[in-house]
Image (tube, grey):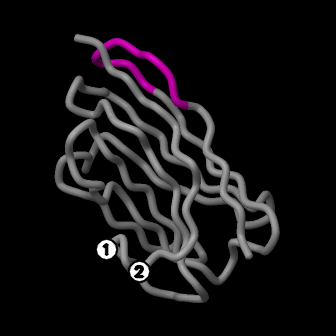
Amino acid sequence: QVQLVESGGGLVQAGGSLRLSCAASGRTLSSRTMGWFRQAPGKERDFVASINWIGASTYYADSVKGRFTISRDNVKNTVYLQMNNLKPEDTAVYYCAGTNYDTQIRSTSTSYIYWGQGTQVTVSS
């Protein structure tokens, strides 16, 4: 079993930056694809970014491409999401997610079996 805990959310003005962290406990994150998703009030949970097991490949939703960067440190058992040039439409609860042992990038929520509790990101205009 893998437990995921997100941190780093908060309130920021448009154009600002935040760095989210996702710390894992229980079992190692290595050999697992990791992803970030977000859910705004009244909307479905959307894919944000994914990174493969060694961090060699990444994939982003079009809405965040060029502004967000996903990375991972398998020694620290942690995944990060650096968010720059934030916009009000980025406001959402952000969730970290992990797959079972996998080597491929995954962008659908059904591919992930481990989820964190979420961290709120609010971007003011």
How many numbered badges does the structure rendering display?
Answer: 2
Relative to 28, does residue 84 appear above or below in the rendering? above
Q: Which mark is residue 62?
A: none
Which image quadrant: the N terminus? bottom right
Q: Amino acid at mark 1?
A: Thr
Which residue reaches farthest front?
42
Write down the residue under mark 2.
111
Write down the residue under mark 1.
108
Q: Residue at x 44, y 85 (%)?
A: 104
Q: Which residues are magenta?
A: 9-17
Other residues around mark 2 within 10 Å, as few (<14) / some (14–19) / many (≥20):
some
Pointer 1 with pointer 2, Cβ within 8 A:
yes
Q: Who is closer to the viewer here, 24 or 56?
A: 24
Relative to 9, does residue 74 appear above or below in the rendering? below
- Looking at the image, residue 103 sits to the left or right of residue 65; the answer is right
User: The residue tagged with tag 1: helix, strand or loop?
Assistant: loop
Q: Amino acid at mark 2?
A: Ser
Q: Residue at x 21, y 40 (%)?
A: 42
Picture coordinates of residue 93, whole percent (x, y): 41, 39
Picture coordinates of residue 106, whole percent (x, y): 37, 77
- Looking at the image, residue 104 sits to the left or right of residue 102; the answer is left
Q: Residue at x 58, y 85 (%)?
A: 100
User: The residue tagged with tag 2: helix, strand or loop?
Assistant: helix
Q: Quadrant of residue 4?
A: bottom right
Picture coordinates of residue 86, whole percent (x, y): 31, 27
Relative to 32, does residue 8 appear above or below in the rendering? above
Q: Who is closer to the viewer here, 16 or 36?
A: 36
Relative to 122, does residue 13 appear above or below in the rendering? above
